[in-house]
Amino acid sequence: MSLVSEEFPTVVPYRAEEITIPADVTPERVPTHIVDFSDAEQTDEQLFQEISKANVICIVYSVNNKTSIEKVTSYWIPLILDNTDKDSRVPLILVGNKSDLVEHSSMETILPIMNQYSEIETCVECSAKNLKNISELFYYAQKAVLHPTGPLYCPEKKDMKPLCVKALTRIFKVSDLDNDGILNDSELNFFQRTCFNMPLEPQALEDVKNVVKKNLRDGVCDNGLTLKGFLFLHTLFIQRGRHETTWTVLRRFGYDDDLELNQDYLFPPLKVPADCTTELNHTAYLFLQSVFDKHDKDRDCALSPEELRDLFDVFPYMPWGPDVNNTVCTNEQGWITYQGYLSQWTLTTYLDVQRCLEYLGYLGYSIIAEQESQTAGITVTRDKKIDLQKKQTQRGVFRCNIFGDVGSGKSGFLQALLGRNLMHQQMIKEEHKSYYAISTTFVYGQEKYLLLHEVFPDLDYLSDADLTCDIVCLVYDISNPYSFDYCAKVFKQYFMDCKIPCMMIAAKSDLPETKQFYGCSPLEFCRRHKMPPPQSFTCNTAGPPSRDIYTKLSTMAMYP
């Protein structure tokens, strides 16, 4: 009542009316709804209902009444804890009222209580009579909700909590643009602008580093802020009651009140209509290139296992398994090359754009690339029907589904796209096998991605994904007389009447050709159905297999 009227009421009722403080008169610019309770007028049931709805609870005691102080721990705190969800902690503010009646402070008695209960954000001594700290009380209540101490800091250990350290460590690594383990002046200024919309003045920058130097031996290195120094600064902010500084940083980098990355941050809405695909645009490729360069420390245009782990250190899990090394191009040591790295990102974007958005979120794409969200890095292609009408496409990624009977050479065809001959393929472990392969090809001078997908050979259980592609490859083994029959059946059952271009691959062409047990020869079959003649292919070569067939496939996909 003193807050609203700015004067002490001559008659104090048992319970004040509910009031809402408008957003424009509060420092945090949020409306605040204040609910009072009086056991003289209300039931316990009403109290429990109000507790369950509260975002923050103020426990008021009288500083000149020992019983009132004791009741804080003997009654109020246990009652509140029993009636709130243990997983969603409600912050508490202890309010010592009637400070005008005593000469001393009650803080000496209250501090042990604050240390005992982590739910207590702070304690404020005030006087409703002379209006001392009344507005401050409600400021702290707002602050306890918007910038709570609990998730960030452990008062007993006088240190930040592990989840907070983990989140700030990721933020440091994302902000360390050259991956040298320190934030230089340029990186600190970018970080400052990103979080607080203003750069640090040169003197302020030096002052910050001097504070760290004074308190931490290895907090500053080569005139830049180390991870230890960065974490020390945030500990200092929290200890000095400036939680909002740390919370501003955390929220800017996508964290919620539980210090988990917000789902809205990781998965911004993106509408992908039917018959459209998703690709990375130029801005996204530039960003991913910078991430690669940042972690390719030996500048060999490939990521060693250690470099790859370092790159994905900002992820909560390792997103790429051993199968990725058999999906994209690698060097002689089996390490993912620069081209292979971009190819895998292209594959993820095409097959599972939501996962791509999530991954870009972990890397801090929207922050570092200064975009509204990860969706700014995605291009949604036009409807496939338009491409078919115009007989050309603007897509940069072409999907080719590979059909063939068991043992026909499908896997070899996939691996050959990555430059691997039969001898290399025989070293691939079965558990590391991939049913996808992706690499770049050139169509009339334009670089395109060709994505091959090996379809499981079961005629009766082909899914929509198995049948949705830009071009179909039908692979048969020329040395097996029963191999072509499967290709003919797949074509007649699924592709004879559709507009998707098809190509027949005569695999294992290094072996003696056998007459196929089918009504007509593969060449005659292709003529009847207006397909190109079967293309001879083998991966049993001394060096990398020929790539001519992949250029043909990409060209057919580009001009359907």
Image (cartoon, rainbow, N blue to C red):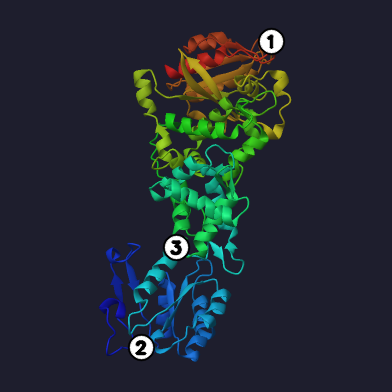
From the top left corner, tell me how far across and down residue 210 is, in percent.
53, 52
Q: Is residue 496 above or below residue 309?
A: above
User: Please, what secondary structure does the residue beneath circle 1 have?
Assistant: loop
Residue wearing tag 2: 41
Residue wearing tag 1: 510
Residue drawn at x 53%, y 35% is 291
**Among numbered discs 2 and 3, the one appearing first in the sequence:** 2
Label 3 amino acid? Answer: His
Q: CA distance from mark 1 to mark 3?
A: 70 Å
Q: Is residue 464 visible?
A: no
Residue wearing tag 3: 147
User: Please, what secondary structure does the residue beneath circle 3 have?
Assistant: loop
User: Please, what secondary structure does the residue beneath circle 2 have?
Assistant: loop
Instruction: Check disc 2: other Cα within 10 Å, few if <14, some if 14-19, many if 20+.
Output: few
| Image depth: mark 2 or mark 3 in front | 3
**Which quadrant would residue 178 be assigned to in this image?**
top right
From the top left corner, tell me how far across and down residue 446 is, in percent.
45, 17
Q: Is residue 66 above or below residue 227?
A: below
Q: Is residue 498 above or below residue 15?
A: above
Label 1 amino acid? Answer: Asp
**Among numbered discs 1 and 3, the one appearing first in the sequence:** 3
From the top left corner, tell me how far across and down residue 247 is, in percent.
46, 57
Q: Is residue 287 above or below residue 102?
A: above
**Among numbered discs 1 and 2, the one appearing first in the sequence:** 2
Q: Report whether 267 appears left or right of 538.
A: left
